[in-house]
Image (cartoon, rainbow, N blue to C red):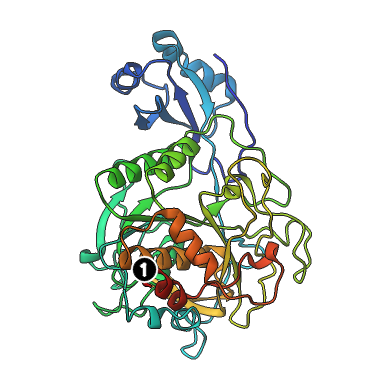
Amino acid sequence: MAMATPEMAPEAQPEGQRFKLRFPQTEAVAAAMALEAPGAGRKLLSNTRRRFVALEFPPDLDSGQILERSEIYQREFGAMLVPDFQYDLEPNEIDFEFFTESIETDASLDDVVDAVRAPQAWEKTRGANVTIAVVDTGVSGARPEFPHSKRKGSWQIEGDTPWTDWEGHGSMCACIAAGTRDSGGSFDGIAPDAGLIACKTRFYDSELANIYDYLADLKAEGVKIVASNSFGMKRGTPPDPDPDSDFLPALDRAISEGIPVIFSAGNNHQRAGGHPDECEPNSVWLYKSHADLMAVATCDLQNRMWFYSSRGPGQFFGQPNTNRKPDVTAPTPRNGRVVYGDDVRSLANGWGTSGACPQVAGLAALLLSAQPALTADDIFNIIRDTAVDIGHGEHCQGHGRIDCEKAVLQAVS
């Protein structure tokens, strides 16, 4: 049986070794899921549209043993085994992702919301009738920022619970995008009346493919969705694309259905050898070069680019369907207080581009709520056109720092 070997993330196999079985016929997917094959890998999920089943093997097996145990799928169905590629969370625990003592006088999400002029935009819209899908580590249902009335759906591995957060990061992103004080929460997000879909993942290709097919199906049913994604690849040099990706075709499908998709630009500038004040070298990786999605950089509240915020123009800039990245910038504060998991915590060196991305997702929700006929391209153009120049080159700041009031006023004018 052939087995492809793309570059894998260092954390790719923390609990077990993940693979996908690729099938030549759609009917084989259901048959393989029903097959009783002890020792041939734990079946985690399937995707009939993309003709795969995701398997997990014990971490102590070598490649020969894995091939031997999964041989039954080749024999019965003509399957091919390929690695289930894993992407990284955007925080960089070495360079900036660490907590500091939380002090009430520290800057917080409130200061960020004020800086991007969201309260002024709320005079026109607070994001009602739009749902933000947070593709991340889950969302803490214990937090009052996420009452049951805000929860509009979920995706998770069967048997898991989406309204829990295995790391804390997803709750941060959800709060920044759409948290609310209405039920006693500590913060309002950028779009406090928007709904949330918790898409809980460990960022495997198979999971992301199923998430984006799920979101595309919802959009086809008429649900107004914005997608927030704060994951990527932690690299100082351009990574190799996954040659067996099912996530990327599913992402393309969701975009073609009209979902505005927002990504963090990445936290790779220092890794790539860049000086904090320079807009080079390039460190925006992979699909984040695509013109039909937005990639978001981050600065501090004094409009200085964070030393880790990835610079453009993007790994694949110049190829079809690409534009110069990042698209825009959103601020994250030093020692900034924000929901993280079940608690309010302070992060010493900002929230990374992880915390910038959901600000733009929240702004997209405000625009779509104010003008439901807007297309994703309309939304992206408004956000870029109304961004404020903060004095850095385009490969640092993109079009500038977002301004929610200007964007909403342009949308409704």
Residue 136 in sight here = no
Q: Total number of numbered labels? A: 1
Residue 220 percent across, percent down from the top left: 29, 43
Closer to us: 223 or 354: 223
Q: Residue at x 25, y 63 (%)?
A: 129
Quadrant occupied by the N terminus:
top right
Give the secondary structure at mark 1.
Answer: helix
Mark 1 Cα-neighbour bin, 10 Å: few <14, some 14–19, many ≥20 = many
Where is 324 relative to 29, above or below? below
Residue 222 percent across, percent down from the top left: 25, 49
Specify the quadrant of the image occupied by residue 316.
Answer: top right
The furthest residue to the front: 413
Residue 412 in sight here = yes
User: Which residue in the structure is indicated by mark 1?
Assistant: 366
Closer to us: 281 or 365: 365
The furthest residue to the bottom: 105
The furthest residue to the top: 75
Q: Residue at x 40, y 12 (%)?
A: 77
Q: Residue at x 52, y 44 (%)?
A: 14
Closer to us: 380 or 117: 380
Quadrant occupied by the C terminus:
bottom left
Where is 120 relative to 41, above or below? below
Q: Amino acid at mark 1?
A: Leu
Residue 266 relative to residue 174: left or right:
right
Residue 43 percent across, percent down from the top left: 37, 29
Residue 84 percent across, percent down from the top left: 51, 34
Specify the quadrant of the image occupied by residue 212.
Answer: top left
